[in-house]
Image (cartoon, helix red, strand yellow):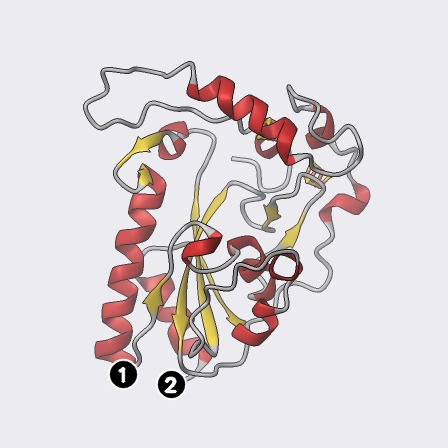
Amino acid sequence: MNTHCLVDLALRSGVLLAGIADADALRMSPSHRETTQQTLPETARSVLVLALHHPMTKPELDHWGGEGDTRGNLSLILTAKIVAEKAGSELGIRPVPLGYQPEQGTFLKDAAVLAGLGVIGKNNLLITPEYGSRVRLKALALETELPPTEGRADFDPCSSCAAPCLTACPQEAFASGTYDRAQCRIQMTIDEATPLDPADPDGYNISYCRFCETACPVGRT
Ligand code: SF4
Ligand code: SF4
């Protein structure tokens, strides 16, 4: 079993991007160094990262409040289960799906960068060459040590961009030049107070702001 086999299995299972990150490198990633949260299983040697495309034509994938939080994340949860089962039957390994929040597993953006899926942009989001920031992520821990996948060394989208992401924010969360979580949280509270359809039987009725994501021209669809 090698890295290519596992990534290929993931891609055959319905995700559009997949890669492998080294678990020890992830434990030392910028977000991990800023927190005491270290819930990546101690036995993890590698992390498989899956990415699902969230195109602007399908905003409903991002609406919050129902099973799995969003329809997109529910799809990723189900796909991760399929990947784990196939990895067991086809490759003899047992990847363990991790949760969405850092305290449930790991920092997904850091894992994606270490797996070569993209870079962190000025909008504080993962930017992939293929789909820009319009992806959602899921990680699975592996006890098998695998070589990490590598991304495009020449991919540096922010260096030649006028950065519309920084001025798109309704709360001016990038006014200082870096992301201000507290300002973003103000907008989230507004979004939570104005549900799309409180009667939605599936409960996906909160549409959080995505302006810093959708303003980015990379991979726009
Ligand atoms: S809009 Fe430009 S500066 Fe902002 S994240 Fe995208 S590529 Fe980078
Ligand atoms: S999600 Fe919206 S409020 Fe938050 S930083 Fe991005 S543009 Fe600003």
Residue drawn at (63%, 68%) of the image: 28
| Label 2 residue SS | loop
Answer with the quarter of the image where residue 104 lies: bottom left
- The location of residue 121, given as percent across then percent down, is 68, 45
The answer to whether residue 173 is left or right of residue 109 is: right
Residue drawn at (63%, 35%) of the image: 181
**Residue at the front extreme?**
36
| Residue type, mark 2 in image | Met
Does any portion of residue 215 appear in the rendered image? no
Label 1 or label 2, whichever lies nearer to me, is 1
The answer to whether residue 167 is left or right of residue 138 is: right
Which residue was labeled with disc 1? 92
Is residue 3 depicted above or below 66 in this figure?
Answer: below
- The location of residue 17, given as percent across then percent down, is 46, 57
The answer to whether residue 111 is left or right of residue 200 is: right
Label 1 with label 2: CB-CB less than 8 Å: yes
Which residue was labeled with disc 2? 1
Answer with the quarter of the image where residue 36 lies: bottom right
The disc label shown at residue 71, or none:
none
- The location of residue 145, given as percent across then percent down, is 47, 83
Ligand 1 rendered quadrant: top right
Does any portion of residue 50 appear in the rendered image? yes
